[in-house]
Image (cartoon, grey):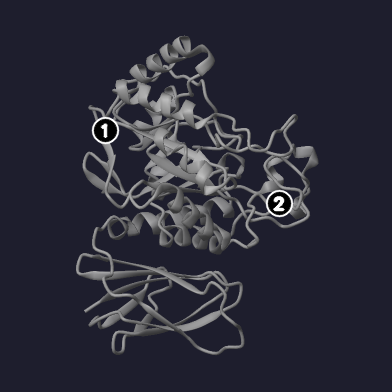
Amino acid sequence: MWKQRGGVLLAVVLAAAGARTAPIQMGYDKDGMITVNGARTFIVGSYYAGNKDHPPALESYQELKEAGFNLVSASGEQAALAQQAGLMFWTNIGTLDLGKREESAQQIRERVLTLKDHPALAFYEQFDEPAWTWIGEPNAKPGAPRATSEQFQATYELMRGVDTNHLIYTNHAPTNLVGTLQAYNAGTDIVATDIYPVTPGGIKYMFALFPDGHQGDFNDTYISQVGRYAAKMRAVAGPNRPVFMVLQAFAWEALLPLEEQRSEKILYPSYGDSRFMAFQSIIQGANGIVYWGSHFMPQPSEAWTTLKQVVREIADLAPALESTQSLQASVQVEYHEIGYDVDSGIQWLGKAHGGKLYLLTCNADKHRNQATLSGLGAWRTCTVLNEGGRTLTVENGAITDTWERFGVHVYEIRN
């Protein structure tokens, strides 16, 4: 939503300073993990550098890099700044107009030729949310896509005929049927969706929201819906194609004109919200996390600081996330009675790296949960990361812990 749409360009400055001088060879592994010049790479990206009050300068891109981002949307001179800061970038390239195919094809071909040798280019993007129709749009026709899967496939084949080094990224709205979205797979390499569930309630009806005030369409209106959409997109993409989750970096009320905003309704995701949504996405199979909306977020601010804190945690875990060694045993979860039933409960992902086991867990329930996780093998010590050095006892391959409402624990377990 409101992302840069087709037909942008993009005279890219190729002479920017930076370590890379040759085009990046982008690909992906059999589990969807992106590869950069052959190296497995977990993606943490942003649609913006800086914000609406501070147009992006080199310092904005350097701040993203220092926080742990490795990807940003950029075009023109911004691409040069991104490269100088050590970031990769992606850019919108447009989609074929099949009614004016020859003219449209020539325009896209020229754009790709202009971009393809840029040493910081990672991905192209065709058209944002191609299958989605918002019921609030004038003359909206539910089921009538903004761009067809046939357009996407034809554009993909054209672009790949010019540039085989880079991938194509498509972000879908969280709505639409799995089968509808799968039809676009022939026109993309990376499948993504954007879901922004943090709302104070009672906000004004606006672009992309349903009449009930929610952007998503699942019955689950809590932030735990993010994991369901991640699982949905994994079903769309299949087991091998990359899946990215586009997460919330804005307050819905702050999208309104300043004179219409109500201060009591401006609600940014908290540290706990952002941490849960990011880690639940990863646990449910995301190969990358991308943030939209920071353009509308005050910088500096507590909201911006906490978002960067979550990004840093993900970036610090990247070597483990990129590992091909997953936990072989199945973790068994035994819940303890604390007065609540269990709905979605504890979700987990295990990765082995550097002689350690990293166990990512989250509580997808709106109530606290206490549980014992068993089946961890012969590991002996457990540190809970980013929780002040807290440790747990490992007994007979099991640990016991308590998770708050939508809580996250990341365990580093070793011998």
Give the SS element for disc 1.
Answer: loop
Kindly indicate the quadrant of the structure image that contains residue 223: bottom right
Kindly indicate the quadrant of the structure image that contains residue 63: top left
Cα distance in 3D space between marks 1 and 2: 40 Å
Which residue does the image show at 61% across and 88% down from the upper left?
A: 339
Which residue does the image show at 53% across and 69% down from the upper left?
A: 364
The vertical placement of 106 against 62, above or below, is: above
**Picture coordinates of residue 386, whole percent (x, y):** 41, 68
Which residue does the image show at 39% across and 20% down from the upper left?
A: 12
Q: Which mark is residue 84?
A: none
**Picture coordinates of residue 164, whole percent (x, y):** 27, 28
The vertical placement of 399 against 246, above or below, is: below
In the picture, measured across the screen, residue 357 lies left or right of residue 64, that is: left
Quarter occupied by the C terminus? bottom left
Crowdedness near tag 2: few (<14), some (14–19) or many (≥20) residues, C-alpha within 10 Å: some
Kindly indicate the quadrant of the structure image that contains residue 325: bottom left
- Between label 1 and label 2, give the one nearer the viewer: 1
The answer to whether residue 77 is seen in the rendering is yes
**Picture coordinates of residue 371, whole percent (x, y):** 46, 83
Q: Which one is in front, 43 or 52?
A: 43
Q: Which residue is mark 2?
A: 266
Q: Three-letter amino acid code at disc 1?
A: Ile
Q: Which residue is mark 1?
A: 24
Q: Three-letter amino acid code at disc 2?
A: Ile
Q: Which one is in front, 58 or 95?
A: 95
The vertical placement of 359 against 110, above or below, is: below
